[in-house]
Amino acid sequence: MKALAARRHDRRAPVVLLLLALLLTGGLYAVFAPAPAGATPAQAASTATADDVAAGKALFQANCATCHGPAATGSDAAPSLIGVGAAAVDFQVGTGRMPMQANGPQAPAKPVQFNDEQIAQLAAYVASLGDGPAIPSDEQVDPALGDPANGMALFRTNCAMCHNAIGAGGALSGGKFAPNLWDTTPTHLYEAMLTGPQSMPVFNDAIITPDEKRDIIAFIDQQGGAAPGGLDLGSLGPVSEGLWAWVVGIGLLIALAVWGGAKSS
Amino acid sequence: MSHDNTTDVARRSAGEHPERFDDPGVHQPNPRLSDLDEKHAKKAERQVAALFTISIVGTIVFVWAYFALPPGETPESMRLSNIVLGLALTCILLGIGLAIVHWAKTLMSNKEYVEERHPQRSDDETRAGAIQALQDGAADSGISRRGALKGAGLTALALFPLSIVLPLIGNVGEDWNVSKFKHTMWRKGTRLAYDPTGRPIKASDLTIGSIAHVIPEDLHEAESPLDEKAKAVVLLVRMDPRDLKSEREPGFGFDGIVAYSKICTHVGCPVALYEQQTHHLLCPCHQSTFDVADGAKVVFGPAKRPLPQLPIEVDAEGYLVARGDFVEPVGPTFWERLT
């Protein structure tokens, strides 16, 4: 006992204690946390249990209620989540847009803050508040089953004005922007169309049918690969090309003209 | 670069002008490093040779890549082919160009010469001979004798440009029927349909926050569907009726659904960047911004007028139909618009 008491004053004691505390917390979490369902969010959502809803509610109270209100009815800072459905949660949380890091023109995608199971639980809770669009099945979003040619026609009319003709993204007003779509998962693409996150309008299943949504996903799936023309400068069209032509191109020509006209030493 | 010929210039004190400035002569530049030192000349020679070698290697690579790296079928192979051919061509032409300029600047003589201009006037005898030859020719051809022929010839020459000018001017605008600008193919009862599928739209299709890009359902029956589409396209927006502050034409909407022309009133780009939260509609060409919640009035940008609103209602089957054409011309201002 005396030896232990002496060790208490060791410089390393706080570190050891901290490690023990972390170990204990982790162990307790592993014991009490629900076992991983080992399922995709889509399956998890379709088989949401009362436990999932309860766990989702706890997560919601801890992470979302500050802005969206304890009953998800919204506040001055954030909209009500009643009736937005599981799809909206899966998109907003699954792409890292929520929880929002800071107030700004829009919530950008960032590293995802929750694991798949937690996202499914949050989605189950929000879906239990009111009817809303559900998370699409894997078959609904499979690019291989879509018709990219039809998808292109639909994309050109409905999406290209903001997201660029090949989905490279583009600017909106006041610091808002339509993001690049190349690395967005098919499920998130589908959910974004269905729920209309942030500045994006809603394209519900009557306006763009589920099959048409899959066609659009098939079209986006084929974009963003190697550009046959070499440097694509972000595929942003005349703005970035103009910047290069005027600043870099003409700058180089001027530099060459100055060099050619200067006398040799 | 110091001028040591300042002594050639007439000196003057303040307020005193010299009679004339002496000719300072041709300025000869200072000798270059490569003129003074054979070692520098050799170095410049090696640099020029290296630049030419870059060009030679570029040509070899170009020829090799032309056969070894065909564009193929995939974007990756096209990209590789284009990049290698392009870089090789850059080396070929830039190598030659830089080598020539460097050669001229460092090794070729930089002595400056003046070449005096020769008088250009011919001597009097030659001038008189030329005039005589012209006069002899005119007399010989007998132009002045046959006045009728002269008149006919000149008339023919004067009229001939009409055959060039007439089609050029006639093709400008092609169609002078300005009233076309003032009407679109929307009629009372025309159903609103989704672009590009042509499915008719039910009012119940649109949930709050949704938009639809709209064409007239009978667009494909039009004589020239693309021309008609360019005038008739409409953006349909449904918002919470509480958010709807005003409409361009009060009563033209239906239960929070408003239909505005998609043709910008600035220069006619399709205005379609709709921000759901702000209800702003943004034109991609010149950033004109319209507030759909407030009569589509211009809140930013060069557009002068709000977007025209299409009057809509719901028919017996629940489909959205037009109550008539736009009440004002769509799109940009034109001469005869008079507003």
Image: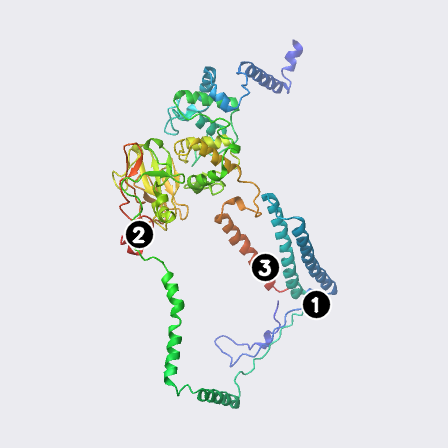
On the image, the x and y values in percent for residue B125 come to 52, 91
Residue kind at label 1, given as amino acid type: Asp
Q: Is residue B149 left or right of residue A48?
A: left
Q: Nearer the viewer, residue A265 or A98?
A: A98
Respond whether the residues carrying marks 1 and 3 are from the same subunit: no
Mark 1 = which residue?
Answer: B35
The relative height of residue A176 versus residue B84 in the rendered view (above or below) is above
Mark 1 or 2, nearer chain start: 1
Mark 3 = which residue?
Answer: A256
The image quadrant of residue A68 is top left
Residue kind at label 3, given as amino acid type: Leu
Taking the spot 39% from the left edge, 32% from the top edge, the residue there is A206
**In the image, which is nearer the foreground, mark 3 or mark 2?**
2
On the image, the x and y values in percent for residue A88 come to 44, 28
Q: Is residue B17 left or right of residue A5?
A: left
The image quadrant of residue B208 is top left
Taking the spot 73% from the left edge, 65% from the top edge, the residue there is B37
The CA distance from mark 1 to mark 2 is 76 Å
